[in-house]
């Protein structure tokens, strides 16, 4: 870097370039004033390497945390999907049971209606037979009366 004094000792140094913001307190011009010239290259490189290692560790920890949270979210989504599937299956089974119950009730109503209609038809036929028997008896009585009238 161009921040070290000229090694030839002539006192001419290359153009000044300010150090990074976080290392400004280690500015070589200020260190000259204090009387202790610093070798920024070594110190800066060590600190920069330590800082980058720390940043990488922080980034790795962040990525681990993000991965952990994603895994938790994925597991929660899977569990919710499973609960939804179970709920839907139960609702479908309940709907099927209800449908079968209604079908059974409808069949029972049809059976009862058919039985009632058969009974009504039988009663109607019995009444018709009775009516015909009464009518036949009446006609027989009328016939007998006419015969008696004619032959008496």
Image (cartoon, grey):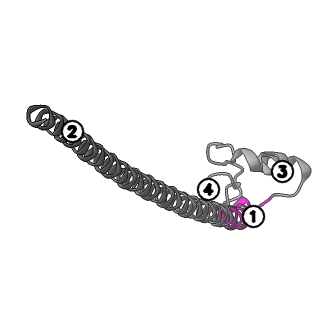
Looking at the image, residue 54 sits to the left or right of residue 107; the answer is right
Nearest the eye: 6 or 86: 86
Residue 42 belongs to the span the image colors magenta: yes
Structural distance between the alpha carbons of marks 1 and 4: 13 Å
**Which residue is painted at 75% across and 48% down in the image?**
22
Q: Position of residue 44 (x, y in %)?
A: 71, 60
**Residue located beneath label 1 in the image:** 43
Q: Magenta residues?
A: 38-59
**Label 3, residues with CA under 10 Å away: few <14, some 14-19, many ≥20:** few
Nearest the eye: 47 or 13: 47
Q: Position of residue 93 (x, y in %)?
A: 48, 61
Q: Earlier in the sequence, mark 1 or mark 4?
A: 4
Tell me the element at label 2.
Answer: helix
Structural distance between the alpha carbons of marks 3 and 1: 16 Å
Structural distance between the alpha carbons of marks 4 and 2: 147 Å
Structural distance between the alpha carbons of marks 2 and 3: 156 Å
Looking at the image, residue 96 sits to the left or right of residue 12; the answer is left
Q: Earlier in the sequence, mark 2 or mark 1?
A: 1
Structural distance between the alpha carbons of marks 4 and 3: 16 Å
Looking at the image, residue 83 sits to the left or right of residue 52; the answer is left
**Which residue is painted at 84% across and 51% down in the image?**
31
The kind of secondary structure the magenta stretch mainly shows is helix
Residue 125 belongs to the span the image colors magenta: no
Residue 141 got which mark? 2
In the picture, the quarter occupied by the N terminus is bottom right
Looking at the image, residue 7 sits to the left or right of residue 32; the answer is left
**Which residue is painted at 62% across and 47% down in the image?**
14
Q: Residue furthest front?
A: 152
The reply to whether the C-beta atoms of the residues labelled 2 and 3 are less than 8 Å apart is no
Residue 138, quarter of the rendered image: top left
Residue 1 got which mark? 4
């Amino acid at each position: 870097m161009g921040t070290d004094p000229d090694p030839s000792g002539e006192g001419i140094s290359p153009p000044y370039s300010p150090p990074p913001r976080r290392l400004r307190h280690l500015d070589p011009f200020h260190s000259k004033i204090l009387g202790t010239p610093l070798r920024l290259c070594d110190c800066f490189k060590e600190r920069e390497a330590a800082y980058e290692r720390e940043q990488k560790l922080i980034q790795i920890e962040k990525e681990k945390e993000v991965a952990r949270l994603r895994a938790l979210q994925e597991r929660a989504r899977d569990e919710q999907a499973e609960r939804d599937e179970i709920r839907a299956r139960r609702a479908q089974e309940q709907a099927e049971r209800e449908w079968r119950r209604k079908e059974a009730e409808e069949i029972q109503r049809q059976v009862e209606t058919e039985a009632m209609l058969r009974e009504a038809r039988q009663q109607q036929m019995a009444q018709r037979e009775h009516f015909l028997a009464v009518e036949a008896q009446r006609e027989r009585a009328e016939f007998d009366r006419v015969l008696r009238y004619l032959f008496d």
